[in-house]
Image: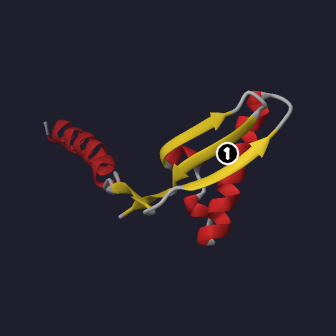
């Protein structure tokens, strides 16, 4: 009987230990600048011009705010890319960064 209780105690301990080691979750949010940044690019086709405009936007943001954390297009607020028929594209968005606290 005592051996059976000991085995149950070990089983409970093995289940409880991983629960103690689970990290707590952190809150996260986006912090955004107050104004739009625009950048333009021209290429031989629309797809490349669009891609180059987004790269140019990231570089313009880096130059403006002197830090790469603001340069992620997928995190930016209200991102748009408008292209002309001559494959000149303008990327426009409000720079944001991901903040964990």
Q: Position of residue 77 (x, y in %)?
A: 45, 48
Q: Secondary structure at mark 1?
A: helix
Q: Judge from the rendering whether residue 78 lies leftward or rightward of residue 21; answer left or right.
A: right
In the orientation shown, which residue stands out farthest toward the right?
Answer: 44
Q: Quadrant of the C terminus?
A: bottom left
Q: Position of residue 66 (x, y in %)?
A: 63, 72
User: Front-most of 1 and 21?
Assistant: 21
Q: Residue at x 45, y 63 (%)?
A: 33
Q: Judge from the rendering whether residue 3 lies leftward or rightward of residue 70; answer left or right.
A: left
Q: Relative to 44, does residue 34 appear above or below in the rendering?
A: below
Q: Residues within 10 Å of mark 1 (few under 14, many from 20)?
A: many
Which residue corresponds to mark 1? 54
Q: Judge from the rendering whether residue 77 lies leftward or rightward of residue 54; answer left or right.
A: left
User: Front-most of 22 and 98?
Assistant: 98
Q: Residue at x 20, y 38 (%)?
A: 8
Q: Relative to 48, does residue 20 appear above or below in the rendering?
A: below
Q: Position of residue 57 (x, y in %)?
A: 66, 52
Q: Judge from the rendering whether residue 12 lies leftward or rightward of residue 84; answer left or right.
A: left
Q: Quadrant of the N terminus?
A: top left
Q: Position of residue 32 (x, y in %)?
A: 43, 59
In the orientation shown, which residue stands out farthest toward the bottom?
Answer: 66
Image colouring: secondary structure
In the orientation shown, which residue stands out farthest toward the front?
Answer: 85
Quadrant in which residue 24 is drawn:
bottom left
Count of marks placed on residues: 1
Q: Residue at x 53, y 49 (%)?
A: 93
Q: Residue at x 22, y 42 (%)?
A: 12
């Amino acid at each position: 009987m005592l051996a059976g209780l000991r085995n149950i105690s070990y089983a409970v301990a093995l289940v409880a230990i991983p629960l103690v080691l689970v990290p707590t979750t952190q809150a996260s949010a986006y912090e955004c600048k107050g104004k739009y940044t625009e950048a333009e690019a021209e290429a031989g086709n629309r797809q490349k011009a669009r891609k180059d405009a987004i790269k140019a936007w990231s570089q313009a943001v880096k130059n403006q705010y002197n830090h790469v954390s603001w340069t992620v297009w997928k995190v930016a607020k209200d991102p748009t890319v408008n292209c002309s028929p001559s494959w000149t594209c303008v990327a426009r968005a409000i720079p944001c960064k991901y903040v964990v606290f």
